[in-house]
Image (spheres, rainbow, N blue to C red):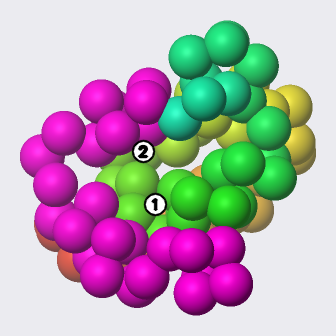
Amino acid sequence: MQQLGLSPAYYVWAFHSESQDELLNSLPSMQKGAPTWAEMRQFGVGWWLRNINSLQRCAEKVGQPLTWLLSLHISVFKMRWC
């Protein structure tokens, strides 16, 4: 994370943010309508995005078959919040 210029504090802040959709939409590739997995990984989206629907939309837009990741995220979400 540090090599990319992002400290873990930014991920923690984004995780606790109530404006995650706005943060997600501020990524350059999301603004262009063509998100890339490399950029999602660079900004640590998988670490801080809590909204299941947003995560699913990202996976569909990127075109990666991430169903296993989505199911893992849903499991963690249910354990944490339900």
Q: Quadrant of residue 21?
A: top left
Amino acid under disc 1: Ile
Amino acid under disc 2: Ile
Tell me the distance, in whole angstroms, between the alpha carbons under discs 1 and 2.
7 Å
- Identify the residue at image location x=16%, y=55%: 17
Answer yes or no: do the residues labelled 1 and 2 have beta carbons within 8 Å?
yes
Q: Is residue 61 left or right of residue 22?
A: right
**Residue 25, position as x, y percentages in the image:** 44, 26
First in residue order: circle 1 vs circle 2 = 2
- Identify the residue at image location x=37%, y=72%: 11
Residue 13 on the magenta segment? yes
Query: Is residue 33 placed above or below 26 in the rendered structure?
Result: above
Which quadrant: the N terminus? bottom right
Report the mark closest to the observer, 1 or 2.
2
User: 7 or 13: which is nearer to us?
Assistant: 7
Residue linked to disc 1? 74
- Identify the residue at image location x=50%, y=74%: 6
User: 55 or 16: which is nearer to us?
Assistant: 16
- Identify the residue at image location x=76%, y=19%: 34
Residue 41 on the magenta segment? no
Q: Which mark is residue 52?
A: 2
Determine the secondary structure under disc 1.
Answer: helix
User: 8 or 16: which is nearer to us?
Assistant: 8
**Residue 56, position as x, y percentages in the image:** 58, 37
Query: Is residue 42 placed above or below 6 in the rendered structure?
Result: above
Q: Which residues are magenta?
A: 1-26
